[in-house]
Image (spheres, rainbow, N blue to C red):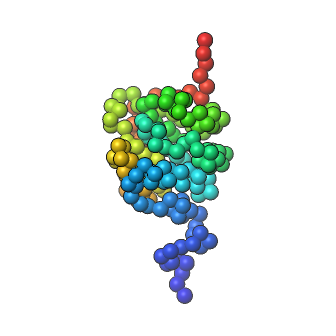
Amino acid sequence: MPAESADPHPTPSTTPSADALRLAVPARALGTRADFQAAVRDTLVHAAPAGVRELWWVANDWTPWPLDEPAVLDGLTAWARRPGAHLHWLSHDFEVLRRAMPRLVRWRQTFSHVIDCRQPDHLPTADMPILLVADRRLVIRVLDAERTRGWVSHDRVDIQRAHEQIDAISQRSSGAFAAVTLGL
């Protein structure tokens, strides 16, 4: 009888929790905006059950991201309540979120203690990658923003490259997107 780990099509009951994210969000090419949204949605909805501790979101245009959807926000809430949860968020412009995604902005206010929002200091807008990284287990990368084409990968090399990009941008960034804005 073959060992469970030799099963080419593992079932959730025979798969370690470390593979839960791989099962929920399989590696694949993203050819449309709907593909990208489904990958982001699946990652964020399954982040808590899969035991994801850290998320990195990197982009300038947040309109393709399904971040204001109730199911996504419920998944993020469950994730943010887990010990050690931390969201690293990089963007040149967070202000569009205040107008376009009010539920996300309220969520951000509630969970500001697990979120670090940063704005690149000297990176041209055109050089900002589009990434979602979950721990060192998954990367969603968009290469063609106009057509929202890219891929989902669990490959260590792809994930390492994404982390290197994020580190380079983060080192030359400053705090942004305050949880609460005070008016005079």
At x 57%, y 41%, the residue is 68
Percent coordinates x, y for residue 116 in the rendering: 54, 35
Relative to 22, is 13 above or below?
Answer: below
| Outermost top residue | 184
Percent coordinates x, y for residue 24 in the rendering: 54, 61
In this view, the residue in front, 38 or 156, is 38
**Drawn side of residue 147 relative to residue 38, left or right:** left
At x 44%, y 40%, the residue is 58
In this view, the residue in front, 135 or 146, is 146
In this view, the residue in front, 110 or 40, is 40
Q: Is residue 82 visible?
A: no
| Outermost bottom residue | 1
Relative to 144, is 92 above or below?
Answer: above
At x 54%, y 87%, the residue is 1
Relative to 119, is 158 above or below?
Answer: below
Relative to 103, is 26 above or below?
Answer: below
Q: Is residue 54 visible?
A: yes
At x 59%, y 47%, the residue is 72
Percent coordinates x, y for residue 43 in the rendering: 53, 53
Percent coordinates x, y for residue 151 in the rendering: 39, 55
Residue 165 appears in which quarter of the rendering? top left
